[in-house]
Image (cartoon, rainbow, N blue to C red):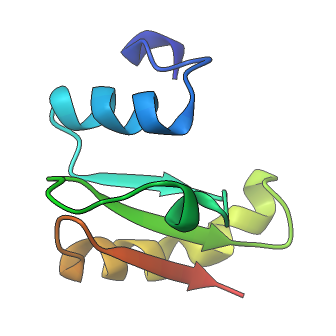
Amino acid sequence: MPKAGLAGKKNGELLSIAEHIGFEVFLTMDKGIEYEQNLTGRSIAIIILRSKSNRLVDLLDHVSDCLAAMRSIQPGQVMRVGY
């Protein structure tokens, strides 16, 4: 996300910046993020997307599940979507 100033940032810094600029949900394919980051007290939530690949054609299969997760996820919560 070069335009948001988030390119090249590490997970902890990335989450802090995203949270500071008003993101409510962080969507990632990084399966280890929930074990690497403590979300206690954070105002951002994480959705971990599991897909065959990060190719758009494979990600499109999960759009409706991601949208449903975004409607119900709470700050500091981690949800998994996909396989």
Instruction: Report x, y in % for residue 40.
Output: 22, 63
Say above or below: 74 vs 72: above
Report the front residue among 78 and 81: 78
Which picture quadrant has residue 7?
top right
Residue ID at (39%, 51%): 26
Instruction: Report x, y in % for residue 69.
Output: 34, 79
Instruction: Report x, y in % for residue 43.
Output: 14, 53
Which picture quadrant has residue 9?
top right
* Number of numbered discs: 0
Direction from residue 62 to residue 27 in the image, left or right? left
Instruction: Report x, y in % for residue 32.
Output: 66, 63
Residue ID at (17%, 29%): 20
Residue ID at (66%, 57%): 30
Direction from residue 32 to residue 13 in the image, left or right? left
Direction from residue 47 to residue 19 in the image, left or right? left
Quadrant (top left, top right, bottom left, bottom right) of the C terminus:
bottom right
Say above or below: 55 vs 7: below
Report the front residue among 56 and 8: 8
